[in-house]
Image (spheres, rainbow, N blue to C red):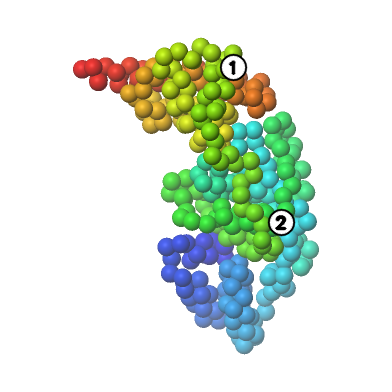
Amino acid sequence: MASSLLDLTSDPDADPGSTAQVVRHLTAWDRPEASAGALAIATLADDPVLRRWVRRDIADRGHAVPRWLADLHLATPAARAVELIGPFREADDVVLGVTIPSGHALTGVVRVDNELGARAVDGALFEHPIETVLHSLRTDDDPDLRIRDISAADARARLTAAFTGARLDEVLRTSTKWRSQRCIVRWMLSRFPDGGDATVPGRLDDVDTDELTARFLASPWGRPWTRGALPLLVERVLTSGLSNGVGDPLLWAPRHVGRLLDPRLHDLDPDELDLDRAPELLRDLIRYGHGERGVRVGLTDASLHAVDRCAPAFRTAVRRWDDDVTA
């Protein structure tokens, strides 16, 4: 409940003093439950001044709060933090935990969407140690899931950056459960050391699409695309692929295929020459790129099936555009 209230008062558009105002209104009820709620909000807000004020107010009123709540600000980070990474890196899960002085553990799993500026878009909390949560996640038998240990400081830096900036709740239709929990995760971060690196691991910057185009065209998969204006189409598709995952235009998940071959033609110029051949090109590019990156055959087949599903509607949209221009 405290996290839900804090999520409202800590919104970037909220009045900066709204959290303190809510806390003071709660204590004015002069009830132990309200005082406990006020202390929980002040603690999760990581505001030492406000927390000390609430503690003094509780003492003055003669109220008592549970020891775990009184000592919540003394929670310590778990010995391990990890990232769960999939083959296409559309999103990573960052897993971290804390232990409160009572000995109870709390673990958070935060989904960071690499295609939305590495923003925190979803997550979950578990009242279990991090190793227990990781064991449960491993039992999903996902052969493509990789677990990478990261430093506590890097976990704080990356998730702090992921929580920074305007919220995308309306766009993403963020679940009510995650909205009610994310301030707890933000408080958990305050227990971790600072000074870490917020850079998304593996992100490709300054990709030379000209070089990639040349490498593809020199390969057996690319030779059919060397004639006429086709190399320009290759470069256009590779440029679109810079939005895939962490910026690797050689990796194409089914959702990336769907974006490129959207019949609304958002991702490609409808006036592009030979645009109706984009699905055929994408098949060859997927075979080449996934081979270069060592992607499992089953995943490559899934992406190729996505091309087969999207191609008919895409080609129909291209022909309709051409007919409208001709008319």
Where, quadrant-wise, is the C terminus in this rendering? top left
Q: Secondary structure at mark 1?
A: loop
Spot the residue most to the bottom: 60
Contact, mark 2 vs mark 1 (Cβ under 8 Å): no
Question: Dot 1: few (<14), some (14–19), or many (≥20) neighbours within 10 Å?
Answer: few
- Between the C-alphas of marks 2 and 1, the distance is 43 Å
Position of residue 222 relative to residue 107, above or below, is above
In the rendered view, does 246 fall on the left or right side of 152?
A: left
Q: What residue does disc 2 label?
A: 152
Choose between 109 and 314: the one closer to the eye. 314
Q: Position of residue 150 (x, y in %)?
A: 72, 50
The reply, left or right, for residue 175 in relation to residue 187 is: left
Which residue is located at x 58 percent, y 29 percent? Answer: 251
Q: Is residue 73 visible?
A: yes
Check disc 1 and report the residue beneath it.
219
Mark whose residue sits in front, 2 or 1:
1
What is the tally of numbered marks visible in this picture?
A: 2
Q: Quadrant of the N terminus?
A: bottom right
Q: Earlier in the sequence, mark 2 or mark 1?
A: 2
Nearer to the camera, 168 or 36: 168
Question: Judging from the image, what secondary structure is the residue with disc 2 in?
Answer: helix
Task: State the image coordinates of residue 185 (x, y, percent, origin top left).
Answer: 62, 58
Instruction: Give residue 93's position: percent from left, percent from top.
Output: 64, 45
Crowding around mark 2 (Cα neighbors within 10 Å: few <14, some 14 to 19, many 20+) is many
The residue nearer to you, when weighing 182 against 175, is 182
Q: Is residue 292 left or right of residue 309?
A: right
